Amino acid sequence: MSSLLTMAIILAAILGGAYVFRFAGQKITNNAPMFRDMGYGVAFGYVLAAALLIWAIWYYFQPLETDAGMKNAGVQFFRWAVQGFIIAAIAAFLFRLFGQFVGTAGTRKLFRSMPLTASFGILVILLYAIVAIFAGAIAPYGQAEILGAANVTAGGDPALGGNPEYPLGTDQIGRDILSRLIYGAQNTVGIAFVTTCLAFFIGGSLGFLAATLQGWLDQLLSRSVDVLMAIPSLIFALLLMTIASVWAVELGVPLTIFMVLIIAVIDSTRVYRLARAVGLNIVVMDYIEAAKLRGEGLGYLVFKEILPNAMAPLLAEFGLRFCFVFLTIAALSFLGVGIQPPLADWGTMVRDLAPFINFAAFAPTAAITPLLAAGAIALLTVAVNFVVDWMLHKSSGLKE
Amino acid sequence: MDGLSSILKIVLQRLGLGLVTLFVVSIVIFVAVNLLPGDFAEAILGQGATPESVAKIREDLGLDQPMITRYFSWLKGMLTLDLGTSFAQLNFANFGGAGTTTIAEQIAPRLSNTMFLAAVTACIAVPLAVTLGILAALYRNTAFDKAANMFTLSSISSPEFFMAYVLILFLAVLNPIFPSLSNIFEGMAFSERLEKSMLPALTLTLVVTAHMMRMTRAAIINLLASPYIEMARLKGLSPMRVIVKHALPNALAPIINVIALNLAYLITGVVVVEVVFVYPGIGQLFVDSVKIRDIPVVQACCLIFAAAYILLNLTADILSILSNPRLRHPK
């Protein structure tokens, strides 16, 4: 009850503070336009932001241990988050600076007009690519290697059940979590990438084919896509995975391969729609007419005439599609029907390590492992989205 | 009168199209399940299948009939809410368990739980998203807009379970405000039920609000370029008044559309969130049945999800027709 009262008092203070702020501003600056024309809402926003900032700084410098010797885990997490944010911002800034002076004239120009979010996105994607490609060299242990001790907590502090040899601890059957996180980049991102490429190959070629040939083939494909898109994709994927899991046992093929095929087919419907729409605009062009009159074959038309001209929208779509596929695979793995062990995978890791969160109040470092795996997924999708957002903004030429 | 009959025609057309889609989707689901190697009978009996018992069960379930007959009897069952009995329950009965419950009895309470969760989410998310979207459009390209853009982009791109665990960490473990497990049962007081489903609802709110807010902002900014807005501005109205009185009524159609589409999106999101919070909804039942390959339940849940999804998309379609005067009065 008292906390509600405190909140009400703080809210009232901010509400009143906004009036005071605007009035004082008008008096001090002698009615500068900024204060003279300021709406009450804007003044409220400024004061609210200032109050939040003050609270954040106050909270950041709270002691890490309470008087009773208990850990103040909330402060610890807050400090980590703030430090992570600042490091990310500085890294993105330095990367942009680096890009402005290194590289060809074209990339230098690109980097000059780039917002920080986009340069952060590119930096993260590059880092993930490096980790994924060189996972075998970076990871201290193998992904399925079962080491001596199980359930070693993260942090490497022997007093808390850690071990300096395993900085992020080991999981319930004694595999090194750091190594599995690194291999996860290879497996999860790699499989998502292959799936997206497959979806683009299927959806793109069928879409262009439908746009070029039109007629009954176009009708047939488009109506089938309509039906497939009427079923929510995660639900449909789960249904097909149930069936595939029986087939996988029957045929002795890994379930992961079925998953790649299923998600590629489901996602190719979205690619088909885009490819067909873009293709329809291209096939009415004169150069297509000319190519047809020259007597070029269907393959030439699709791959040499239509594809190069449809590249830009398809590339932006590739980024977004990759995010969707990546999240679907992560969700399936989290639900236990996606990428199968012994392959290390972030979705499965989150599910397996989730109970550690309950120890957050006593050992913040132990609780962070499931969040690291989930955060690794989130970070990559956020990065790709930042880059795609910037690309779309740039190509649309919108300023507002 | 003429406008009314033509709009009725469009709406009826859409409804018919929706029914046809649902029918075809039911065929797809049925055929997909029939792609299983072996058949139901062997799947039910598992390793202890003898030829006689397999034949008996095939006869009981009508598996010796041709596929088309089976499809129509399945469809009839679905329409009359007779969804059959799950494998798990059949097994239970085979091993001497007392009276079995049918799938319909299993699903009904869970479906209402899921509806409750979706309703709570919508009650929080819709007003929040529309307000924030209007504010972002009003103060576009300011620090507030940029911060909101970054925040929504991040929450759209994060997986639902990441959001869920972050919320658990801060609102359940570090500051025990809400329970992290939603053990909901029948006959629970409304307030207690609300408290227990708060964390899953908040997780879904975070994901859905981001979508809705971005689309609301885009819809309003799109309108702000129109001449009549320019006129309203030139006549000296305050920015807030321009947006609420002039832009919002015209942006209502896309916004209603966005809300319906996002409720449809909730249906997929609910599966993962229910699993994280062990919320006894239909998504949880679906995932559990997928894991033990309980085909009849998977089939029924899948059809329910698809029907809800199609229905909401249809509602979005029809509402956007109804709210567009140009479609209501075609030339």
Image (tube, coloured by chain):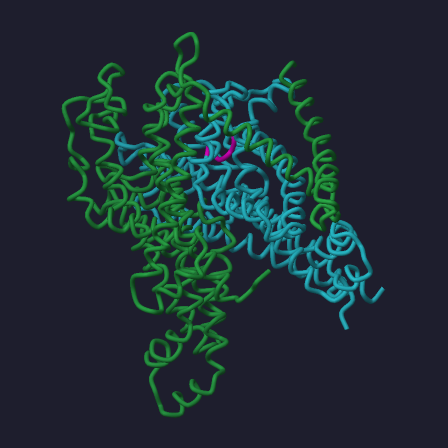
Chain colours: A green, B cyan
Seen at 65% across and 60% down, the residue is: B222
Seen at 51% across and 25% down, the residue is: A58
Residue B19 relative to residue A240: left or right: right
Q: Position of residue B210 (x, y in %)?
A: 55, 44
Residue A253 relative to residue A219: left or right: left
Check the picture and name the quadrant holding the N terminus of chain A.
Answer: top right
- Give the extent of the magenta segment: B281-285
- Residue B241 falls inside the magenta stretch: no
Quarter assignment of residue B204: top right
A138 above or below A107? above
Look at the magenta stretch and give its main secondary structure. helix
Q: Position of residue A289 (x, y in %)?
A: 44, 88
- Front residue (pair B262, B132): B132
Check the picture and name the quadrant holding the C terminus of chain A.
Answer: bottom right
Q: Position of residue A240 (x, y in %)?
A: 38, 47
B273 above or below A99? above
